[in-house]
Image: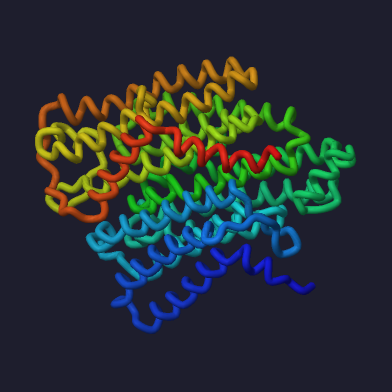
């Protein structure tokens, strides 16, 4: 089979990232540890250049015998993933230098994981989906245990690997069932089989359940969330920041593409599964975080709750619902990176601290840092008119229009409960007796990210329309 030039052109961002990563790997091996800072900056820059290549010039179509697809939704999701991964690498340097684990392999592993995420997002076939998913997962298993001289990081890596392997096996088993009953793995073939009634057997339904279960693990949806709090707490904090944004956005994009693409004819069947997962995720994220004392574990449960809101938008099955999903993911990226940048600045006498109580009196010792975190927490809580409020509002409107009245009401109630632990952090910072002050942060990457995130949230709060228009354009491709 001869692959045309148009295939290579459509995949130029992925090809560029793969080539640069390979070259930087060779450079790092030849130069050794002295190359770490250069490789880190070059990898971060390469990710941003890759993001630019998505739109310069912008093209749509399928490539490599329809294994690979590019449209407005995939390009938008890739942009979010690339920006998130690039910033996560920049946020990592200070932390890993302090714990003496700063090595050139780390940014390259993140780049390889990001390449896998991009392949996942553009997958137009179950086999392409699986290859991209495993490429992402294998690199992330390593970075979770990157700080290998600590028990917590090693334990996080092992837990993530074992449970992730189970989820991959479930997804692959589901894909094999779908192939057997639909006669192909290409999304077009599956869709055609379902529309013709040839794939409506119970075996296809069971296969779909296994595929959704495997993807639910990747996005930390209940009941496949069990790895999230332990891995978030045990992994190095910059790795946790990466896990909280890029892989979650990629997996959610993949779930949207799979369910709203080839399996759209089975909407009535998979909607029930997604609604249950959404309600359980919102409930667990709200109630399980109430007693958390470690801020990284709290953010783990927060991410589970936010996944519930996103799944509710997906369950609506409408163009407005997918638009709300894209909008919420963009806001979620900004909020989460800002919070983790603040967590990375929580140092006392040169030692990282993670307890919520350690934030006591932060407003007096570091008012700028406290105010930025206040804006981010208000937005995560969904307090009007913050950007997080608009994200949740669009999702609830889409759910109500789809007549998902009970899940929407439960989502609002879960959001009210969850606001307690977000506002509790604000109360600790502004009203509790001051604890020993944190080390004064230099104006480095983490401080810049925290302040920029707070500024962006403020901008989106008063002017959500531009981002909403981008989300609408991304969602429109699924509804020709």
Residue 272 placed where, x, y %? Answer: 68, 27
Quadrant in which the C terminus is drawn:
top right
Of the pair 157 and 307, the residue shown nearer to us? 307
Residue 382 placed where, x, y %? Answer: 39, 26
Determine whether, in the image, residue 164 is placed left or right of residue 385: right
Count how many numbered circles sit on residues in the image. 0
Determine whether, in the image, residue 198 is placed left or right of residue 15: right
Please determine whether, in this image, residue 106 is positioned above or below residue 366: below
Please determine whether, in this image, residue 75 is positioned above or below residue 415: below
Of the pair 229 and 389, the residue shown nearer to us? 389
Q: Is residue 139 visible?
A: no
Colour scheme employed for the rendering of this structure? rainbow
Residue 211 placed where, x, y %? Answer: 68, 44
Quadrant in which the N terminus is drawn:
bottom right
Please determine whether, in this image, residue 117 is positioned above or below residue 265: below
Residue 146 placed where, x, y %? Answer: 39, 61
Residue at image x 67%, y 47%?
170
Please determine whether, in this image, residue 250 is positioned above or below residue 282: below
Q: Residue furthest bottom?
A: 30
Residue at image x 70%, y 53%?
124
Q: Is residue 453 visible?
A: yes
Residue at image x 34%, y 67%?
41
Of the pair 104 and 373, the residue shown nearer to us? 373
Residue at image x 64%, y 55%?
60
């Amino acid at each position: 089979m001869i692959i045309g030039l148009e295939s290579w052109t459509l995949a130029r961002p992925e090809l560029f990232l793969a080539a640069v990563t390979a070259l930087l790997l060779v450079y790092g091996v030849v130069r050794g540890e002295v190359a770490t800072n250069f490789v880190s900056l070059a990898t971060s820059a390469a990710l941003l250049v890759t993001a630019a290549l998505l739109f310069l010039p912008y093209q749509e179509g399928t490539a490599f015998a329809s294994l690979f697809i590019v449209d407005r939704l995939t390009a938008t999701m890739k942009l979010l993933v690339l920006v998130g991964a690039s910033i996560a690498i920049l946020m990592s340097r200070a932390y890993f230098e302090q714990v003496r684990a700063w090595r050139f392999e780390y940014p390259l592993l993140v780049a390889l994981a990001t390449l896998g995420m991009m392949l996942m997002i553009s997958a137009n076939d179950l086999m392409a989906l699986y290859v991209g998913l495993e490429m992402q997962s294998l690199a992330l298993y390593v970075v979770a245990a990157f700080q290998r001289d600590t028990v917590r990081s090693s334990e996080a890596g092992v837990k993530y690997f074992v449970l992730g392997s189970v989820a991959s096996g479930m997804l692959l088993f589901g894909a094999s069932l779908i192939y057997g009953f639909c006669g192909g793995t290409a999304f077009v073939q599956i869709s055609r089989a379902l529309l013709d009634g040839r794939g409506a057997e119970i075996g296809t339904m069971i296969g779909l359940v296994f595929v959704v279960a495997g993807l639910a693990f990747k996005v930390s949806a209940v009941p496949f969330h069990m790895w999230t709090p332990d891995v978030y707490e045990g992994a190095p904090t910059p790795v946790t920041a990466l896990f909280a944004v890029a892989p979650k956005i990629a997996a959610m994009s993949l779930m949207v593409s799979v369910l709203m693409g080839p399996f759209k004819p089975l909407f009535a069947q998979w909607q029930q599964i997604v609604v249950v997962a959404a309600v359980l995720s919102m409930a667990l994220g709200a109630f399980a975080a109430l007693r958390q004392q470690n801020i990284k574990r709290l953010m783990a449960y927060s991410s589970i709750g936010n996944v519930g809101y996103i799944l509710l938008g997906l369950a609506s099955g409408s163009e407005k619902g997918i638009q709300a999903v894209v909008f919420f993911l963009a806001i979620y990226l900004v909020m989460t990176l800002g919070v983790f940048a603040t967590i990375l600045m929580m140092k006392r006498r040169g030692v990282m601290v993670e307890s919520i109580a350690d934030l006591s009196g932060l407003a007096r010792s570091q008012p700028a840092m406290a105010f930025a975190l206040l804006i981010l927490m208000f937005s995560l809580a969904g307090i009007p008119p913050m950007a997080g409020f608009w994200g949740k509002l669009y999702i609830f409107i889409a759910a109500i229009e789809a007549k998902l009245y009970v899940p929407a009401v439960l989502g609002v109630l879960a959001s009210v409960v969850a606001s307690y632990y977000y506002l509790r952090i604000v109360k600790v910072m502004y009203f509790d007796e001051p604890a020993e002050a944190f080390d004064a942060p230099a104006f480095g990457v983490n401080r810049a990210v925290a302040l920029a995130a707070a500024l962006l949230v403020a901008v989106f709060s008063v002017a959500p329309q531009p981002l909403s228009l981008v989300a609408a354009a991304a969602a429109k491709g699924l509804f020709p």
